[in-house]
Amino acid sequence: MLRAHPVEAIRAAERPLIEAAAAAGDPDAVMRRAASGVAHHTAALLRRRTGGVYGRSVMLLVGSGDNGGDALYSGAVLRGRGCRVEAVLLDPERVHGRALQALRGAGGRVAAAGTGTDSSTPDVVIDGVVGLAGSGPLREPAAATVAALAGAGVPFVAVDLPSGVDADTGTVHEAHVRADVTVTFGALRRAHLLASPTCGRVEVVDIGLADMGSEPLTVLRPDPAEVGRAWPVPGPDDDKYTQGVVAVRAGSARFPGAAVLCASAAVAATSGMVRYVGSGSTDVLAGRPEVVCHPSVAEAGTAQAWVVGPGAGTGTEAVADIDAILARGRPTVLDADALTCVAGHPVVLRSASAPVLLTPHAGEFDRLTGGRDRTDRSGALRRYVADLRDRGIPATVLLKGRVTLVDDGETTWSIDPGSSWAATAGSGDVLSGVAGALLANGLGCGGEVAWPAVAAAVAHGEAARVAAGRTGGAGAPIGAGDLLRALPSAISALRGA
Ligand SMILES: NC(=O)C1=CN([C@@H]2O[C@H](COP(=O)(O)OP(=O)(O)OC[C@H]3O[C@@H](n4cnc5c(N)ncnc54)[C@H](O)[C@@H]3O)[C@@H](O)[C@H]2O)[C@@H](O)CC1
């Protein structure tokens, strides 16, 4: 499991190291350690991209703080390995003096931004514009320089964080660096897990930082192997009931496919039993004859968990069904149309006595929250969950996206499957079916639903990877049906991870 920390915790952990270095009369000792890591990973990127290091050209974008200092010291190391190094100073008056001297001493070239920089395109850029103290988008002249270099296809190595990405919220501002590699120090920052697609490959350099624990703002990323180990496997004494029965209320005349995708995903996720309530039983049974269908919520037998919402409608009858399902007192996934119902009739959640898992995408989350605070996604999520919990609703929320977040009011989990192939119609129906089946099974929980939600998101991402890669090569677009069919291979891959 990966842990990513808020800036305040990182600064507190770094303080003793910096104080010790200063007391020993070498105030830049920690910075040079960090910089040698940046140089190491930049050299590795150069080798991958160009086949070597010697003679390659490196541009340093140098801001006014210690992030720029790291870049300058790393330039000095790379100069020692035979690179041509040019530092572009974005704020020459406030540059880190000793680091600049080190670069000059190593034979690096220095220019102020916008004045006589080397006109050839570098092999790599080291982004030392801003790190932990950065706020807001890239400013000029950095923004124009970064855009021109990115447009020319030059790879970026970000020092600590890609500039233009907020360290705590992971907000990616419009003008930002998109890094191929991000080299950070001692421990991950929250942005590394909240904005992972913008950070590229993240390398953590050991600078002597003590191990950091978890606190309320730590973001966690599950290890796929851990999810695989926790996946429900029937034991010798299990039968269809002991593995958990999940009931699915989904589909309508308008959206018959949602019923098929959701119920079939539940069947694929565990080997217990799946009940179905809705108008789509003929279609569901055509694909999955093992599903047990019921004419109404009231007539459905016992289930350990419910899923309600995919394609299920938003009218009075749909709201009444949500109310009746929540009144059963079982863990329940509220997805798709059920979320629209909740947004319009928040009072319906008062019927929930057992844990509820809400699984909105960005638009549904806006509807639930009134569109507050679009930039700080994880902060808005934590506030919404806290608000529900303050109202006595035992809610966990899974916010879908390329980076899916799960928050139960105490912990934020981040899942990034590494591609966006799963952004396809019906993919959410598959996710809620898997989550419901895991909830019914009681996967590793004492009544809480965060871990089953996290496991469902990991399996869903893995299924997208398997489905998109089925043709080999670079992968190909998939539909939700492909994702559904890839679930068994994905679960098997996780269990073998
Ligand atoms: N504290 C430590 O122990 C270590 C810090 N290190 C480096 O030091 C960095 C933090 O250094 P600093 O605290 O000096 O801060 P930064 O270098 O992140 O930022 C410097 C200054 O940039 C300005 N700024 C903020 N947003 C900006 C924007 N959007 N565009 C342009 N300028 C902007 C601000 O005036 C800010 O004070 C870390 O990210 C890391 O790279 C490393 O050397 C490892 C050790």
Image (spheres, rainbow, N blue to C red):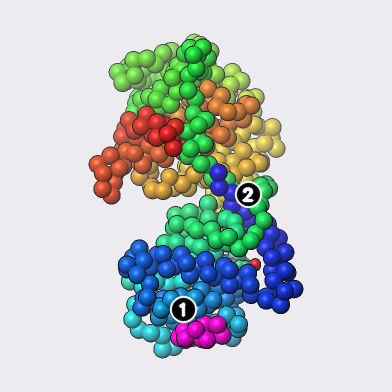
Give ligand 1's quarter of the image: bottom right
* Disc 2 crowd, CA 10 A, few/some/many (<14, 14-19, 20+): many
Q: Determine the secondary structure under disc 1.
A: helix
Q: Which span is picked out in magenta?
A: 100-111
> Would you say 368 lies left or right of 426 here?
right
Residue named by callout 2: 218
Judging depth in this view, the residue of 347 and 16 nearest the camera is 16
Q: Residue at x 52, y 34 (%)?
A: 453
Q: Residue at x 46, y 64 (%)?
A: 41
Q: What is the C-alpha distance between the residues marked 1 and 2?
A: 38 Å
Q: Position of residue 30 (x, y in %)?
A: 63, 69
Q: Residue at x 33, y 65 (%)?
A: 49
Judging depth in this view, the residue of 309 and 332 nearest the camera is 332
Q: How many marks?
A: 2
Q: Is residue 415 visible?
A: yes
Residue named by callout 1: 80
Residue 170 is drawn in which quadrant? bottom right
* Disc 1 crowd, CA 10 A, few/some/many (<14, 14-19, 20+): some
